[in-house]
Image (cartoon, helix red, strand yellow):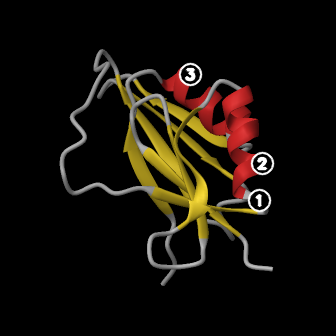
Amino acid sequence: MRLLHTMLRVGDLQRSIDFYTRILGMKVLRQSENPEYKYTLAFVGYGDESENSVLELTYNWGVEKYEMGTAYGHIALEVDNAAEACDRIREAGGKVTREAGPVKGGKTVIAFVEDPDGYKVELIEKHS
């Protein structure tokens, strides 16, 4: 078995594609529309789906906002330097919600940013 993708419902597909590609550096891997059922899918990630897990951004036509609920946590990305990643994300227009620093009770350096729909993305600094 292999983890294929995580699906996120988004309120503005182009805004979300911009965040995940321009700000977080992913690529659009494929996109499709289903006019009969009124939705559009965009798959984004850092590498080909045959070898990497990706995000499926689902836009249900006419739905601009979703309730987060209490079960969802976050997506985690490995970065070389969390503080520098926060600076780049902020400079590109992204929202940093927790500055880089050690996780409570540990040494791993993390930070959090938020996508345009309010989904949290954890940045975990690579161990040297």
Question: Distance from label 2 to label 3 (Cα)?
Answer: 26 Å
Residue 84: assigned label: 2
Residue 27 is at least partly visible in this image:
no
- Where residue 26 sits in the image (x, y, percent)? 70, 45
* CB within 8 Å, label 2 to label 3: no
Label 3: how many Cα within 10 Å (few below 14, some 14–19, many 20+)? few
- Where residue 61 sits in the image (x, y, percent)? 34, 20
Horizontal side, residue 96 vs residue 78: left or right: left
The amino acid type found where label 1 is placed reads: Asn
Q: Who's the residue at 60% across and 74% down the image?
A: 108
In depth, the one of 48 and 75 nearer the eye is 75
Q: Who's the residue at 41% across and 55% down the image?
A: 74
The mark closer to the camera, 1 or 3, is: 1
> Looking at this rendering, what residue extends furthest in the bottom direction?
1
Residue 7 is at least partly visible in this image:
yes
Label 2: how many Cα within 10 Å (few below 14, some 14–19, many 20+)? few
Above or below 12: residue 29: below
Horizontal side, residue 54 vs residue 29: left or right: left
Question: Distance from label 1 to label 3 (Cα)?
Answer: 28 Å
Label 1: how many Cα within 10 Å (few below 14, some 14–19, many 20+)? some
- Where residue 115 sits in the image (x, y, percent)? 49, 35
Instruction: Say which quarter of the image contains residue 105.
Output: bottom left
* CB within 8 Å, label 1 to label 2: yes
Question: Distance from label 1 to label 2 (Cα)?
Answer: 5 Å
**Mark closest to the chain's N terminus, 2 or 3:** 3
Residue 81: assigned label: 1
Q: Who's the residue at 65% across and 66% down the image?
A: 52
Check the picture and name the quadrant holding the C terminus: bottom right
Residue 14: assigned label: 3
The amino acid type found where label 3 is placed reads: Gln
